[in-house]
Amino acid sequence: MFNVQNPSKDYSQGHNLFERNGDDWVLVSNYRWNVLVQPDGTQYHIDRKGNYKKFDRTYQEQSSERPPLGLFLEMFKRENSFFDK
């Protein structure tokens, strides 16, 4: 597709981005925050120290009594798949 010669495992996670595979969120990251964005626009921000915030689709901070630990675990698994073992 992009006329590259090296195998796709060098630059991908092995998922087709154009195929719906059951994921209900998108991961967005920068130097400080990992952000899970859900289809309804809800965002969960977690920093490198484990602090987290919840925002609605209009970016208004929401109270959140319990973090979505299952989502965060899946996010960390996916993020770590980019690093050599």
Image (cartoon, grey):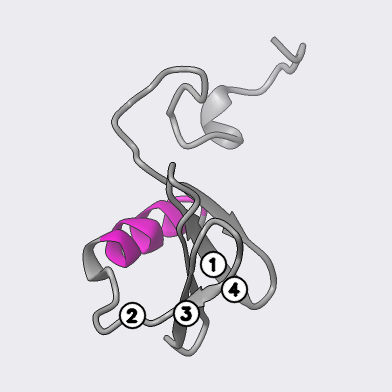
Measure how far apart labels 4 and 1 are at the Cα level: 4 Å
Disc 3: CA contacts within 10 A as few (<14), some (14-19) or many (>=20) = some
| Real-space CA distance between mark 4 and mark 3, rounded to the nearest whole angstrom | 10 Å
Element at badge 2? loop
**Magenta stretch, residue numbers:** 71-82
Q: Which residue is mark 3?
A: 53
Could you tell me how far apart the alpha carbons at marks 2 and 1 are, in whole angstroms? 17 Å
Provide the residue designation for mark 4: 33
Pointers 4 and 1 in contact (CB under 8 A)?
yes
32 relative position to 47: left or right? right
- Residue beneath disc 1: 34
Q: Earlier in the sequence, mark 4 or mark 3?
A: 4
Q: Secondary structure at mark 3?
A: strand
| Residue at the image position 34 percent from the left and 37 percent from the top | 23
Above or below 69: residue 26: above
Which kind of residue does numbered mark 3 sit on? Lys
Circle 4 or circle 2, nearest the eye: 2
6 to the left or right of 56? right
Dot 4 lies on which element?
Answer: strand
Residue at x 56% of width, y 24% of height: 8
Badges 3 and 2: C-beta atoms under 8 Å apart? Answer: yes
Say what amino acid the circle numbered 4 marks. Trp
Q: Amino acid at mark 2?
A: Ser
Kindly check if marks 4 and 3 are in contact, taking CB atoms under 8 A apart as contact.
Answer: no
Is residue 7 or residue 63 the one in the foreground?
Answer: 63
Please report the residue visible at 45 percent of the width from the left and 57 percent of the height from the top.
42
Residue 64, compared with residue 12, is above or below; it is below
